[in-house]
């Protein structure tokens, strides 16, 4: 595939604390300590808040206030902290104080000693006074000390012990502001300690304090040197076999997350233990990355990708081309549509195809036998049991109703070509009869068959419409005022690129068209690429903001191919669950508005 990848623009980087590559020198920490009444966090019995804002080792802000908790302070707490009911009698309430503290800490990483305790009270206060909890990153200096310090260095990791060990400028006194200042000093000493262990970013720090296995921690070097660009990453074992394939808007950021505490999946931890290298594939756009991921997963079938789909396992429902056509489940699409064949799919399994066939056969009872029939069967050939029961027109016998069978096949061909109205009416009649007989489970199964048929029909005609386009160019505006431009040929992504911000995108369009992959069409309705790739392209084309630049044919769907039917069945199912409506709605199938065939980009 000839895709031109445009390098990411330099000169702009968003510094955010959830960015896993943020250097510690650029991180703003708010070190907080609370004094409380000793009750539960939900009571928010806070009596004092002290906080210090630090950045790059320097203090850039301080916050201190007493708080009237509105409840008596227990004597043993007053004796420990020196904060009495009389001392806080004239202090502001927590309802007044909380917004100012949240503003002071906004956008920073929250640090506390035994952080779950302090954070728990702050969360309880937000819940009590209807303030949304900002959910900042949290660093616990007690936990950091347990990981960074050896057992023979300190007997325990209490704040007073650590302050004495590091000889901090401030001694903890069980008052919030003093304890916050002491904790800030302890934080800086701990950061100096772990800096020698390779902890240089916020991601490193959170991984160091998180529950990360030894295997994950020792494999962090696999992310070194990876690009901060959209694309695909491939974890490989020592033999170069793909273990896991993924995609991200930032390869480096995503791969580094596999070696942190944020990665909780057990199978990923196992994969990391086996992995020996990560191979990046930089892509021009996120869409190109998703397409490449699909192709690589389909070809490599990595063992740790749960959604590894084998294209050969998908099935199509076919109206055959023979003397007496029938419905058949096949694995490939042949070039016989002009001869009268019709296809629906692809289905992920044979079961789904069989259920769709049952819905079609209810309205158009074609034969179910697989015997090859003569074009002019002899009258002496006996019919099958279904023919004797009057449920088959017996095209296998010379005495059968061949004209009637031809009409049934013609109706079935029309339904598979995009008109499901008769099928829907027939299945609804069956559902109504079963419901009247209180056979609700059977009625529900017929509804699911019809819904599956509607989904397959809509999918088929959307794929067929895209596959019929020999060339389609579309673009999506970016946040930097550039354009992500894609060339699609017969349902396969042939080229992708980014135009420069503010520049005329038309030269990039011309360059991509000249360099795009040559794509040969496949038999309709099969796209030239993987069906999953074409589905991803259709999903992108439907996204808000995407514009069609040029196309050689209009993008349209048959009027009654299943879109409105699928929506109605989904609503009916929801109504049955919620109890709002017991009868299916009798809305007519409305037209599907085609999107404009050509919509030019503005320069």
Image: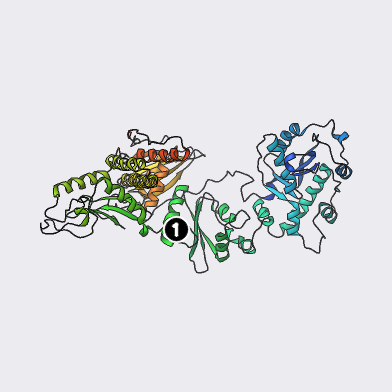
What x and y, as percent, mark residue 255? 56, 56
Indicate the quadrant containing the N terminus: top left, top right, bottom left or bottom right.
Answer: bottom left
161 relative position to 24: left or right: right
Please give the name of the residue rendered at 79% of the width and 36% of the height, measured from the top-left corner. 69
Q: Is residue 365 visible?
A: yes
Near-viewer residue (530 or 49):
49
Report the label total.
Answer: 1
Among all residues in the image, which is located at the extreme bottom? 239
What x and y, as percent, mark residue 250? 54, 50
- To which residue does mark 1 refer? 308
Indicate the quadrant containing the C terminus: top left, top right, bottom left or bottom right.
Answer: top left
Q: Is residue 285 visible?
A: no
Check the image and report above or below for 166 versus 459: below
Check the image and report above or below for 393 versus 300: above
Secondary element under disc 1, as helix, strand or loop, is loop
Q: Residues within 10 Å of mark 1 (few under 14, many from 20)?
A: some
Among all residues in the image, which is located at the extreme front? 437
User: Which image quadrant is residue 136 in?
Assistant: top right
User: Which image quadrant is residue 421 in?
Assistant: top left
13 relative position to 188: left or right: left
What x and y, as percent, mark residue 100? 73, 34
Near-viewer residue (323 or 164):
323
Please give the name of the residue rendered at 18% of the width and 50% of the height, measured from the top-left corner. 393
Q: How is the image coloured?
A: rainbow
Please give the name of the residue rendered at 54% of the width and 53% of the height, measured from the top-left corner. 251
Check the image and report above or below for 531 versus 240: above
86 relative position to 569: left or right: right
Near-viewer residue (472 or 297):
297
């Amino acid at each position: 595939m000839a895709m031109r990848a445009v390098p990411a623009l330099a000169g702009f980087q968003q510094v955010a604390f959830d960015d896993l590559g943020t250097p510690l020198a650029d991180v703003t920490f708010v070190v907080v300590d609370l004094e409380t009444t000793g009750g539960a966090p939900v009571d928010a019995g806070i009596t004092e808040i002290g906080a210090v804002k630090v950045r790059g080792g320097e203090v850039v802000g301080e916050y201190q206030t007493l708080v009237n908790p509105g409840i008596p302070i227990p004597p043993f707490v007053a004796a420990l902290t020196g904060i009495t009911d009389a001392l806080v009698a004239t202090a502001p309430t927590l309802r007044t104080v909380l917004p100012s503290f949240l503003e002071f800490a906004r956008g920073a990483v929250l640090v506390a000693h035994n952080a779950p305790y302090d954070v728990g009270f702050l969360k309880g206060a937000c819940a009590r006074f209807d303030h949304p909890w900002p959910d900042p990153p949290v660093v616990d200096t007690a936990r950091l000390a347990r990981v960074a310090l050896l057992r023979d260095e300190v007997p325990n990791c209490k704040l007073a012990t650590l302050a004495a060990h590091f000889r901090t400028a401030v001694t903890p006194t069980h008052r919030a502001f003093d304890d916050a200042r002491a904790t800030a000093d302890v934080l800086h000493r701990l950061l100096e300690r772990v800096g020698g262990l390779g902890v240089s970013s916020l991601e490193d720090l959170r991984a160091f304090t998180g529950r990360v296995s030894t295997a994950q921690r020792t494999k962090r070097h696999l992310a070194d040197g990876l690009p901060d660009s959209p694309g695909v990453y491939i974890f490989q074992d020592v033999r170069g076999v793909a273990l896991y394939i993924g995609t991200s808007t930032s390869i480096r950021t995503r791969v580094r997350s596999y070696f942190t505490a944020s990665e909780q999946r057990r199978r990923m931890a196992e994969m990391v233990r086996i992995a020996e290298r990560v191979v990046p594939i930089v892509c021009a756009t996120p869409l190109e990355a998703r397409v490449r991921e699909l192709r690589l997963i389909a070809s490599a079938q990595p063992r740790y990708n749960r959604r590894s789909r084998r294209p050969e396992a998908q099935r199509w429902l076919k109206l055959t081309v023979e003397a007496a056509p029938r419905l058949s489940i096949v694995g490939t699409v042949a070039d016989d549509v002009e001869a009268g064949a019709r296809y629906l799919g692809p289905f992920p399994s044979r079961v789904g195809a069989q259920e769709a066939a049952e819905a079609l056969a209810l309205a158009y009872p074609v034969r179910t036998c697989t015997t090859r029939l003569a074009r002019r069967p002899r009258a002496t050939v006996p019919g099958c049991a279904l023919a004797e029961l009057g449920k088959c027109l017996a095209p296998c016998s010379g005495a059968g109703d061949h004209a009637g069978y031809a009409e049934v096949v013609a109706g079935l061909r029309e339904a598979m070509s995009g008109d499901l109205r008769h099928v829907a009416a027939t299945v609804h009649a069956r559902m109504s009869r079963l419901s009247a007989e209180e056979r609700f489970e059977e009625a529900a199964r017929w509804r699911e068959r019809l819904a599956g048929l509607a989904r397959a029909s809509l999918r088929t005609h959307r794929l067929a419409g895209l596959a019929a386009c020999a060339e389609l160019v579309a673009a999506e505006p970016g946040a930097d005022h550039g354009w992500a431009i894609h060339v699609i040929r017969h349902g396969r992504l042939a080229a992708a690129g980014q135009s420069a911000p503010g520049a005329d995108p038309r030269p990039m369009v011309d360059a991509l068209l000249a360099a795009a992959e040559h794509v040969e069409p496949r038999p309709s309705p099969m796209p030239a690429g993987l069906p999953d790739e074409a589905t991803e392209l259709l999903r992108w084309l439907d996204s808000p903001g995407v514009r069609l630049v040029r196309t050689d044919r209009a993008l349209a769907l048959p009027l009654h191919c299943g879109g409105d039917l699928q929506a109605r069945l989904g609503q009916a199912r929801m109504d049955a669950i919620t109890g709002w409506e017991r009868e299916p709605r009798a809305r007519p199938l409305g037209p599907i508005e085609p999107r404009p065939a050509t919509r030019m980009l503005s320069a």
